[in-house]
Amino acid sequence: MDKNNIVRFSRLIRESDNIVFFGGAGVSTESGMKDYRSKDGLYNTVKQYGVSPETILSRSFFYRHPDVFYDFYYRYFLDASAEPNRAHLALAELEKSGKLKAVVTQNIDGLHQRAGSRNVIELHGTVLSHHCPACGAAMPYEQVRALRGKIPKCDRCGHIVKPDVVLYEEPLNERVTEAAAGAISSADLLIVGGTSLAVYPAANFIHYFGGENIVLINRDETPLDGRATLVFRDNIGEVLSETVKNHNAADNF
Ligand SMILES: [Zn+2]
């Protein structure tokens, strides 16, 4: 990792007062969340279930095969061994300092909130809440998780309970997309991390940014590299924690 780039990144943070973070799967994988989009995730899913993860996570499949859906969902999303990592913690710290105004994420695991972030805009919803589509009753996260992959049935009416996540074939929530667009368009520094910006429509949100500086942290190349002020190809937890540390130290002088 280039120390000079950490110093430059920390300087950009000092000069900004409306920072927004836009993140993808790479933020979660460092916490040990299994990534169903990875080569292994894809291979294992097709081998075990005979269909792709995208098929299982579609609205029509959910209603046709809720047993398969919940088996997969439990395995990939309710595995509570994952803990917030240095990336989540550094972003929560930046928010507390007043610099960071919002985290916009494509992840549904709730790890940002567990790290202490408050304004988290979840484009694809969250596994932390579940509702009955028939009567609207909520089922607590712990209750769904305790079923260990069995189908949760509504306590009130018996209908299958659905996670508050956006499945394939479903539109993004309008209130959420407006909040994300609003946060990104008013930002003066946009940090993009752990995403190859390949998942649409989520990746389109970047285009709302009208500010000058974008900092990009991702293992692989992205379509936004040419537009970025700084590009890191390193571990996102390491980059963010080192930068926030550097920023705090500079603040004390
Ligand atoms: Zn119900």
Image: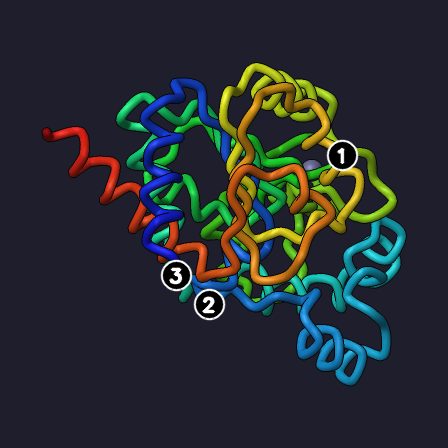
- Quadrant location of residue 10? top left
Q: Residues within 10 Å of mark 1 (few under 14, many from 20)?
A: few
What's the distance in space between the residues labelled 3 and 1, CA to CA?
29 Å
Q: Is residue 43 left or right of residue 108?
A: right
In front: 100, or 119? 100
In front: 111, or 198? 198
What's the distance in space between the residues labelled 1 and 2, CA to CA?
27 Å
Please identify the quadrant where the N terminus is shown: bottom left
Kindly state the secondary structure of the residue where label 2 is placed. loop
Name the mark nearer the viewer: 1 or 2.
Answer: 1
In front: 140, or 154? 140
Query: Looking at the image, which residue sits at the far left?
Result: 253
- Residue 89 in the image: above or below residue 62: above
Q: Tell me where residue 216 appears, x and y as whole percent.
A: 55, 45
Query: Looking at the image, which residue sits at the far front?
Result: 4
Name the mark nearer the viewer: 3 or 2.
Answer: 3
- Asked whether mark 3 and ligand 1 are closer than 8 Å, the reply comes as no
Q: Tell me where residue 242 appears, x and y as whole percent.
A: 29, 50
Kindly state the secondary structure of the residue where label 1 is placed. helix
- Which residue is labeled 2 in the image? 32
Q: Tell me where residue 87 appears, x and y as whole percent.
A: 39, 50
Q: Residues within 10 Å of mark 2 (few under 14, many from 20)?
A: some
Whether residue 164 is visible here, answered yes or no, is: yes
How many numbered dots are placed on residues in this image? Answer: 3
Q: Amino acid at mark 1?
A: Asn
Point 71% across, 76% down: residue: 39
What's the distance in space between the residues labelled 3 and 2, CA to CA?
22 Å
Q: Is residue 220 left or right of residue 46?
A: left
- Which residue is labeled 3 in the image? 1
Residue 204: mark: 1
Decide: marks 3, 2 in contact (CB < 8 A)?
A: no
Whichever of callouts 3 and 2 sits on the residue coming sooner in the sequence is: 3
